[in-house]
Amino acid sequence: MPGRIAVVSDVHGNTTAFEAVLADIEARGITRIVNLGDVVGKGPRGSAAIALTRERCEVTVRGNWDTFIARDETQLWPAAQWTHDELSTDDRAWLLSLPNTHDLVMGGQHVRLFHASQVHEFHRVNYHHTEEEFRGMFTNTDFTGDGPTPTVVGYGDIHGTFLEVDLGLTLFNAGSVGNPLDAPGAPYVVLEGEIDGEESTAEPGSPGVSITFVRVPYDVEAEIAVARDLGMPDVEAYALELREQVYRGSAFPPPS
Ligand SMILES: [Mn+2]
C-alpha cells in the first residue's frame, strides 16, 4: 500500500527547529520518521534532541558528530567538550549503538539512507561532486554491508538540500533541520511510494519513489536565547549560522 516516510537530518541539538519539523510531519499525518544523524553538536540541547529522536524516529543512523562527541571523553575544543558533557552516559552509549545505514524498499526501488557517504560517516560528498563520487554513493562497501545495491540514496551531512537524478540513479540530500546553510527555515524530505510491495529492482513501469522537499519556519531568536541562557560556548557564531546560514568556520574537522 502507498505510504510516506519523513527523512530528517542534522538536528544538531536545535530542538526549537526539530519540534517545528516534528509538528509539521504530524500535521501531514505522517507517522514514520527516519533520522540521518548528527543529532548532537553545534546547538545547545543535544540530550533533549536525543530524547525527541528516540521518541519519534523509528530509525536513526549515526553521524560524524554523534561518533566523535560520544566516543572521545576529551574533546578538541571547548564547545565540543561542552556538548559532550551535556549528554548523559546513556545518551552517549545510544549514539555509539546507532547503525551505519538504513536500507528499505519503496516503490519497487531499493532505497539506502546514511549520514555522509558509503565510505563512512566522516567521508563527505559535497553538492559539487564528480560522476565517480555520484556513482560511488550507490555501491556497497564494508560500511554499507552487502545487501542489494540501491537506486535511490538519501543523505545529510553537508547541510544543504539537493536532488540529482542521472544515470538511472536518484540522489537526494535532506539538508539540516537544526543548522541549515542553504536557506532559512528547517528542511526535511517526504518519501512516498508503495511500501509493502514485493522487492524488485527498477523495472520499466515501476512506480518509483516520490520525493518532496519541505521547509518549516521556526523561532530562530528563541533558539539563540536558549543557547545564550544555557551558557553555550561560541553562541555568537551559532547565532550567525541560524540567522544568516553563514558557516562559522573552524580549524577543526569535521566542520559540518
Ligand atoms: Mn552535520
Image: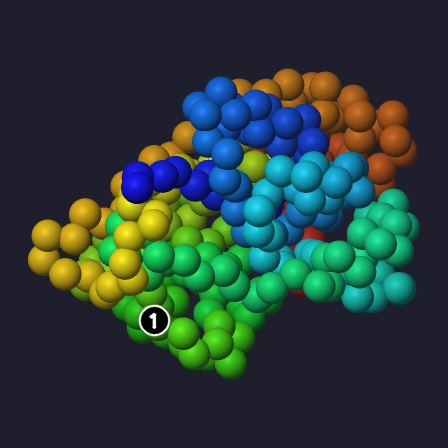
* Above or below for 159 versus 72: above
In this rendered view, identify the residue nearer to me: 17 or 180: 17
* Picture quadrant of residue 140: bottom left
Residue 244: x percent and y percent? 57, 29
> On the image, numbered disc 1 is attached to which residue?
149
Tell me the SS state at disc 1.
loop
Question: Which residue is painted at 48% across and 72% down in the image?
Answer: 144
Report the quarter where the N terminus lies.
Answer: top left
Q: Residues within 10 Å of mark 1 (few under 14, many from 20)?
A: some
Between 60 and 14, the one nearer to me in the picture:
60
Residue nearest the observer in this picture, 125 or 99: 99
**Residue depicted at x 84% and y 54%:** 90
Q: Is residue 140 visible?
A: yes
Image quadrant in which you'd find residue 52: top right
Q: Is residue 83 above or below residue 190?
A: below
Whole-percent x, y for residue 235 in the image: 78, 34
